[in-house]
Amino acid sequence: MSDKYRVVIVGAGVVGSSIARVLSMYENFDITLVEKEPDVGWGASKANTSIVHPGHEEEPDVHPLRAKLCVKGNEMWRTWAKELEIPVTFPGELMVFTNDEEEKKAREYIKLARLNNVPGVRIIYQEELRVLEPNIAREAKGAVYAPTGGLISPFEAVIAVVENAVENGVKLMTETEVLGVKVSEGRVKGVETNRGFIEADIVINAAGLYSDKITHSAGVELNFQVKPRKGEYLLFDEDIPVKPTRVLHTTPTPITKGVYAITTVHGNVLIGPTAEDLPIEAKGDASTSVKGLDYVYQEASKLLREMPPRSRVIRTFAGLRPEPPGGHWLIKAYSDPWGFVNAAGIRSPGFTSAPAIAEYVANLISETFDIKLVKKTNWNPYRRDITRLNNRPLSEIDELIKKNPAYGEIVCYCKTVSKAEILEAVDRMIKTGIKTITLDGLKFRTYAGFGMCQGAFCRWRIAKIVSEKLGVPLYDVTVKRTKYGIGDVKTLWVERKG
Ligand SMILES: Cc1cc2nc3c(=O)[nH]c(=O)nc-3n(C[C@H](O)[C@H](O)[C@H](O)COP(=O)(O)OP(=O)(O)OC[C@H]3O[C@@H](n4cnc5c(N)ncnc54)[C@H](O)[C@@H]3O)c2cc1C
């Protein structure tokens, strides 16, 4: 063994990426972050409600880790977001009740807030509620107010965490699927992948929905199963007259935190999610349904005094929660096989808790494998965001264009994104180690395609920029996994003309 432990992390969702960032702080490790998708954060970490939960909804007796790490994660994101320039706000959260029964249920969360040391949580009634949220529904009777509740841009958060981890020495391998963990003589030896074998002394399983498969291949937790629990959403245009100013949600049910109405950090109204348990084999089913979308719209009308019209929906989507047995996260380091670590079945509030989970995993590794962690002296906590035109004063835009005329070439009018931003995003993707430059990857980095027209105007323009920059034919540029297809359209057009 070399003087460093070779670590493979399976899965570049928010959990695996956060673990990579935290471990990159230490001299002890040589880290490879392995992701089966073409980009980072395309699992549950991309399609969720984007709440940085305060932590007053977790029962410490039943879910001690969730209760502890959620509160800590909420604190840690404040620092991480500053260091990494991630869009985040902390407008506070209101759990709204409309009748006596809901009020009784809501009061339980005041007790949990005390047990979990969540600061400032209290019950508020009509007058104060309307001051805190002028757009609250008329029938709202009161709410549990949690001032530390926040909102984050989930996909940008994962991108930023990975960029910083790579800056600090982590190697990212995308489009690399781990097929199994190799164990011999009671120790992990590495992982078998579709691109060959990767040797490792420590393997960390952060594979989300598929973390059951990975742990079974290591020969531990053979009864552990992760089931998909679907959540459907309606995303509205930015230009809506009545938008929530706080994080609003209905009182939770035994399986969800209720339906939310929020204004995302990018200014869109988001309503959802549903909570539907799917069969274990439906891990790829991220479809939406009329029933589910009607339900969330109906529930959200208990929150807002005026609902955004359905005609202003710009997108519907669904995320799949990686639901472990009993809702218990499986976070554990094993002596047999030595070197195997689970950060598996991380369901909500997994996004909020990810930085704290990462620190917890680093300590587990140190204690279980008897590794004295040594901090790097040159670890860089900072990552700069892409230079954006959106919301920038005209005088500064002028300066940017003088230095680089590509800032004057707007490709996405909905979100005011220039060619220079697309090119910067392409460079960053290449530097991070991403093999295929996808149009979705560029969308998540630049916001081009996130607006009202959902890419109808800009998508082919961006594909053209990528094609020219990389010297590949336009029809070889990909959206996610499939090719963009402009070549096919051209062929059809030529055939019709002929
Ligand atoms: C509908 C919904 C709403 C939610 N709302 C919130 C919220 O508001 N706040 C909050 O805190 N949490 C929320 N959550 C929970 C949160 O999103 C998850 O807890 C968190 O994203 C889990 O992160 P992860 O990294 O474990 O999983 P993922 O993000 O799914 O990452 C796992 C990664 O592993 C990769 N992978 C899988 N198998 C392999 C393999 N064999 N080889 C290589 N790579 C592999 C996947 O492609 C994926 O990228 C919500 C979840 C959902 C679905």
Image (spheres, rainbow, N blue to C red):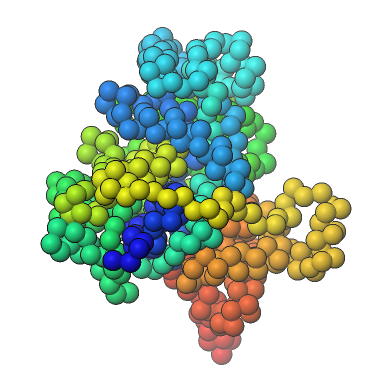
- Quadrant for the C terminus, please: bottom right
Q: Residue at x 47, y 72 (%)?
A: 435
| Residue 124 on image: x %, y % | 53, 12
| Residue 130 on image: x %, y % | 62, 16
Q: Nearer the viewer, residue 152 or 196?
A: 196
Judged from this view, the residue extending furthest toward the bottom is 498
Q: Nearer the viewer, residue 248 or 317?
A: 248
Q: Residue at x 45, y 61 (%)?
A: 170
| Mark count | 0
Q: Residue at x 65, y 37 (%)?
A: 240
Residue 398, quarter of picture: bottom right
| Residue 78 on image: x %, y % | 56, 37
Q: Is residue 121 in view?
A: yes
Residue 497, quarter of picture: bottom right
User: In the drawing, does residue 334 fall left or right of residue 5?
Assistant: left
Q: Residue at x 44, y 64 (%)?
A: 172
Q: Is residue 307 in view?
A: no
Residue 7, quarter of picture: bottom left
User: In the drawing, does residue 301 fall left or right of residue 306?
Assistant: left
| Residue 333 on image: x %, y % | 25, 46
Q: Is residue 60 above or below residue 15?
A: above
- Quadrant for the N terminus, please: bottom left
Q: Nearer the viewer, residue 169 or 448?
A: 169
Q: Nearer the viewer, residue 46 or 59?
A: 59
Q: Is residue 349 above or below residue 386?
A: above
Q: Is residue 412 above or below residue 423?
A: above
